[in-house]
Image: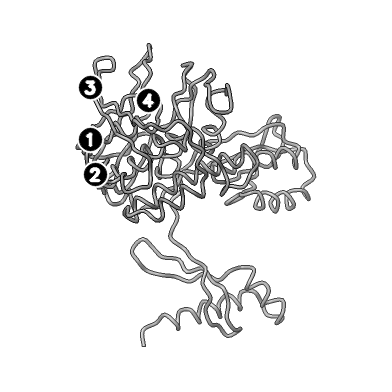
Amino acid sequence: MRLAYFDCFSGISGDMTLGALVHLGVPVDWLKAQIRALPLDGFDICSQVVSRQGIAAVQVAVVSGETHHHRDYRFIQSFIEKSPLSAKVKTMSLAIFDRIADAEARIHGCDKASVHFHEVGGVDAIVDIVGSCLGLEWLGVEAVAASALPMGGGFVRCAHGMLPLPAPATAEILKGMPVYGNGIEKELVTPTGAAILAALARNFGPMPSMQVGQIGYGAGTIELESQPNLLRVMLGRVETAWKTDGSKRLVMIETNIDDMNPEIFGYLMERLFEDGALDVFWVPVFMKKNRPGTMVQVLCEPQDRERVVGCILAETSSLGVRFYEVYRTALERVSVEMPSPFGPVRVKKIKGLAGGVRIVPEYEVCRYIAMERHLPLQEVYAAIVKAAAEKNSPP
């Protein structure tokens, strides 16, 4: 599989992304021809080779005569959908704008469809986003991964005035993505750059085991004293297993409790699942002075971490929690309806790594049948499993 790994040691922006892809070989004239299929005012893409602390890189600038741009999400969505761009480029471009629209809608408390883009609604930002998607397609990229993102500091002047860095839209888009502070008082990650990775990257963290074939550098517009202001994109191949193992970055949240009414644990579990928990565990532990206690472990998506932590701190006697990243590989599963001796029932259809399929009855469905018909729960399970085996067995 052909992978593009974004090494964001100095952050990421739309023009840095486009510059790195041009450095990898994407023809600028081809990009112009493709993007001119969109109903945009006149624009040009200028590129030049620059040096950042001795490293050669491509700097891209989009030039247009546009002075005011207040395009809303609905308008951008419509003209991308109606364009002659490939289905893949449309899907990627719309996913990026969707991330930005979601963030802006949450910040301004308005409907997503009517969000007015300011900085990211101009011709330059549209060209950066659509051009980056075109570049990834031209290079044959099948998957994108990225490093953790450095957060700059200070303030930046935007259409809404002076805003703290990272800008509110950037911070909103970055929810659930790994970030860190590096003390540089500059805007290192822009909303466009954040949205590109939020929409396209399937994994974040150290570079996976891969055979690197090409490396491209995209230069930012500002100079940094402490380090080169570059985005490095490494293009290469990874083993097929990396693509198909289904690994996903999740968060494990833990706390130890030894002074709470045990009856509350049942209610807590229900609340945690309502707030996004994927799994919840109670683990018996011995704490200070040999006091028996319970370790609460909750597995959730990164974007649900704050809500789960809030639930634990509100509903238990815990004074604090700890959390860390974990990776989970899960088998492909889907909920389907199948015939059984009790009528149509919902079951989980699980596909194994070798391609085999097994059927697992849903607990709540079996529980309802057992109580309604006054049957042992185990008997209901066995009957549904047997019906599934007979249905899938060769004639």
- Where is residue 26? Give x, y as percent: 23, 39
Element carrying mark 4 = loop
Q: Which mark is residue 24?
A: 1
Relative horizontal placement of residue 53, taking residue 91 as reference (left or right): left
- Local packing at callout 4 (Cα closer than 10 Å; few below 14, some 14-19, many 20+) is some
Q: Are marks 1 and 2 in contact (CB under 8 Å)?
A: yes
**Type of the residue with mark 3:** Ala
| Distance between mark 4 and mark 3 Cα atoms | 16 Å
In the rendered image, which residue does mark 2 sit on?
Answer: 139
**Type of the residue with mark 4:** Phe
Give me the residue at 48% from left, 33% from top: 68
- Where is residue 197? Give x, y as percent: 42, 39
- Local packing at callout 1 (Cα closer than 10 Å; few below 14, some 14-19, many 20+) is many
The answer to whether 221 is drawn above or below residue 27 in the figure is: above
| Distance between mark 1 and mark 3 Cα atoms | 12 Å
The answer to whether 131 is drawn above or below residue 265 in the figure is: above
